[in-house]
Every structure is written in C-alpha cells, then in structure tokens.
Image: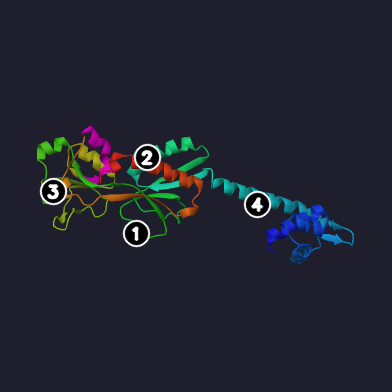
Amino acid sequence: MDRIQSLEVFVAVSEAQSFAAGARSVGLSAPSATRGINALEARLGVRLFTRTTRQVRLTDIGATYLKDARTILAQLQAADAAAAGAAIIPKGRLRITCPNEFGRLYITPILAAYLDRFPDVSADVLMLDRVVNLVEEGVDIGVRIGALPSSGLTAVRVGSVRRVICGSAQYFEANGRPKTPSDLQNHKIVAASSLADTAVWRFGTKDQGSVRLHPRLAVTSIAAAIDIAKSGWGLARVLSYQIGPDLRAGRLETVLREFEPDPLPIHLVHPEGRRASAKLRSFVDFARDHLRKSQMLNEG
C-alpha cells in the first residue's frame, strides 16, 4: 500500500470509527485496511488508534494527524482537478521562441488574437535568431525555419520561405540588375551576419553553384540590412517573409529568382507529443491555421 492510499484508509477508518466500515468505503477488505494502518503506525513510530473489541478511537496524535491527512488529500485532489482541467481548457503560461523578424511580423499578432480568445492563458515570447533547446530552457513551442534534424520533438509544418536577393528600384536604375549569380561580384552587397556564411551565397542547382562575395558592409541585424537595401545603397540577401510588406509596397524588388535554392520549410515544434496540454494544442492549431493562410509563407 503506497503512502497516499494509506492516508486514504486512515481517514476512512477515522471517520467510520471502524476498520471494516472504513475499508469498505475505499474498496478494501478489513484485513487489508488493518495491515495498512499497522504499517503506517510502524513507519511513523506512533499509535494513531486505540482499539477495543467494540470500537476504534483516535489517539490525540491520531486526531492531529487526521487534520493534516485531510489537508494533504484535499490539496492532492485539487492538483489532480487542475491538471485534468488544464488538459481540456487552455490555461496557464505559454512560452514561445521564434526568430526576431518572424516573431515581429507573424507570431506576436497571432498571439495577441489567441490571448483574446483564451483569457486564462498568458504568454512569453523569446525572439532570438538562434535555435533554443526547448526542454533545457523551459520553452513550450518553437518556430523552426529550415530542415529539421532528427529529434524527439513533434513538428507541424505551417509553410515555407525562400532566400531572396533584393534591392530598391533606385539602386537598379543606377547600377543595373544582375543576370546571373556571378554578376553579384560587381554590385555593392550588404550582408546580415545572423544568416549562415554571409560571404558565400549558394544557389539552386549544382551547376549554378555558389558565389563568394566580399560584402562592403556587414550588419548583425536583418532589419538594418533591409533598411539599407531600401535606401538604395546596395543588395541584401534575406528570407522572403522578411520583406513581404516592402515587396507589396514597391519599396524593394527581388532579382535572380530563377537561381534561388529550394524553399526552406517552417515548422512549429514542441516536446509534449500526444500528451500536450490544452494551451499548447490550442495555440498550435490557432497559429497553424493563420500561418497557412499567409501567401508570403506559402509561395514555394
């Protein structure tokens, strides 16, 4: 008999003032209840009941222990009810990680709408241009852009993006448009150093290969690289979603589309699998539906 069950038997026998009646109320035989109480008293080193042939009475220590036992069992029942409710009704704090620009453009607007729908949920968003270990850093959901390595994470695909080269109409009027990747060596390049290997830009097929560039300017901010490209100073390579509003507004244009590498998949990943909490499941469903409707994330 485990400790919780022994407390339940102790409370039942105390309330019934009978081993037989108390045992029946918890679905045990009288001998099983007696053995459980004897084991509990032996572990505590005290006598909880005085026993006669006619009645069972609590000792003074037993009466005090009964109050504590009732409190413990009530708290356990409340914890069980809360956990069961959290599996059905979205509630609690949700921690999400995503790249900076993706968080600004997509996750925070979606999250604001989600929180309006589910008032018992609150959220923290870690917008970082690095891969976060969800389990080690206590994060519920991550946005991953690119091929996923093998892991124990559950992944839901929500779209894809392209690597694009962009510049302003002003820049192209003054400097012309590159026709092939090798033409980029004759253009001013602004590199965003949070992207992998900014000195080498790879293109779609083996025949198209890659081009090693010598950027005139390197910055650690995607947003800064985009702003510089919009100013007409040079060309930048970014992910298509990052310049969606600028493309629609005509502030930027893309070149070398036919040489682009394969699109990069976007996934929502989480470690909870089939036993995910209601807050996690509901957010994944909510975000998935919104992200899949975005034309900018579903061009490839």
Q: Which residues are magenta?
A: 236-250
* Residue 223 in view of the camera: no
Q: Secondary structure at mark 4?
A: helix
Quarter assignment of residue 171:
top left
Camera-nearest label, 1 or 3: 1
Neighbour class for label 3 at 10 Å: few (<14), some, many (≥20)?
A: many
Q: Which mark is residue 60?
A: none
In the image, farthest residue toward the top: 249
> Is 95 left, or right, of 98 in this rendering?
right
Q: Which mark is residue 149?
A: 1
> What residue is disc 4 on?
76
> Is 220 left, or right, of 139 in this rendering?
left
* Residue 76 in view of the camera: yes
User: In the rendering, at what x and y percent does residue 63 appear?
Assistant: 81, 54
Main secondary-structure element of the magenta-colored stretch: helix
Decide: marks 3, 2 in contact (CB < 8 A)? no
- Dot 3 or dot 4, earlier in sequence: 4
Which of these two is toward me, 99 or 38?
38
- Dot 1 or dot 4, earlier in sequence: 4
- Dot 1 or dot 3, earlier in sequence: 1
Decide: marks 2, 4 in contact (CB < 8 A)? no
The residues tagged by marks 3 and 2 sit, at their Cα atoms, a distance apart of 36 Å
The residues tagged by marks 3 and 4 sit, at their Cα atoms, a distance apart of 66 Å
